[in-house]
Amino acid sequence: AAAKMAATRERTENDLLLTMETAEQANWRALVAVRHTVVKYRTMSKEQVDEMEREELMRLHQKERDDRSKVLGDRMKVAGEARSQATAVDRAKLRAKHAQDELKAALSAAAKVEAQANKLQGVGAATSATDRGDQEVTAEGDAKKKL
């Protein structure tokens, strides 16, 4: 257990040392960059410094414009996608409405056909009953004639 704790402590110390060395190297690089900039500014004339600052400002403005343009492009893309989805939804609604209308028309036609079939069956049944009645009357007439 003591060996494990010692190994863990040693790894932790090594990790901490590595982290501190990395941070120190980053700070050193930042310091070197600042020194380089200071030396650069010292060797430049006032006009050159002003020109460099203007260029830096122009780059910053260009970056801002590019960022705004990208955001606007993204918004336009999202709006276009939303419009296309809305159009697709509208088309689907129209197709559904058309299908509903066709279904209603088909159901109406089927109901009419069924009503006509029922009417014909009713007329056929009435005709059959009338025919049977006529046959009975004829049979009675034949019986009377024989008498």
Image (cartoon, rainbow, N blue to C red):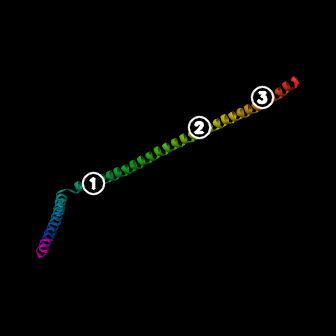
Q: Position of residue 70 (x, y in %)?
A: 36, 49
The quarter of the displayed image where residue 34 is located? bottom left
Earlier in the chain: of badge 2 and badge 1, it is: 1
**Amino acid type at image mark 1:** Glu
Which region is colored magenta?
1-8
The numbered mark at residue 56 is 1
Vertical relation: 50 (above or below) 86: below
Q: Are marks 2 and 1 in contact (CB under 8 Å)?
A: no
Number of marks in the rendered image: 3
Give the CA distance from mark 1 to mark 3: 110 Å
Q: Position of residue 123 (x, y in %)?
A: 74, 32
**Which quadrant of the rendered structure holds the C terminus?**
top right
| Magenta-colored segment: predominant secondary structure | helix
Q: Secondary structure at mark 3?
A: helix
User: Tag 3: Cα neighbours inside 10 Å, few (<14), some, or many (≥20)?
Assistant: few
**Which quadrant of the rendered structure holds the N terminus?**
bottom left
The numbered mark at residue 125 is none
**Amino acid type at image mark 2:** Glu
Give the CA distance from mark 2 to mark 1: 68 Å
Q: Nearer the viewer, mark 2 or mark 1?
A: 2
* Image-based side of 32 in relation to 65, left or right: left
Earlier in the chain: of badge 1 and badge 3, it is: 1
The numbered mark at residue 102 is 2
The numbered mark at residue 131 is 3
**Amino acid type at image mark 3:** Asp
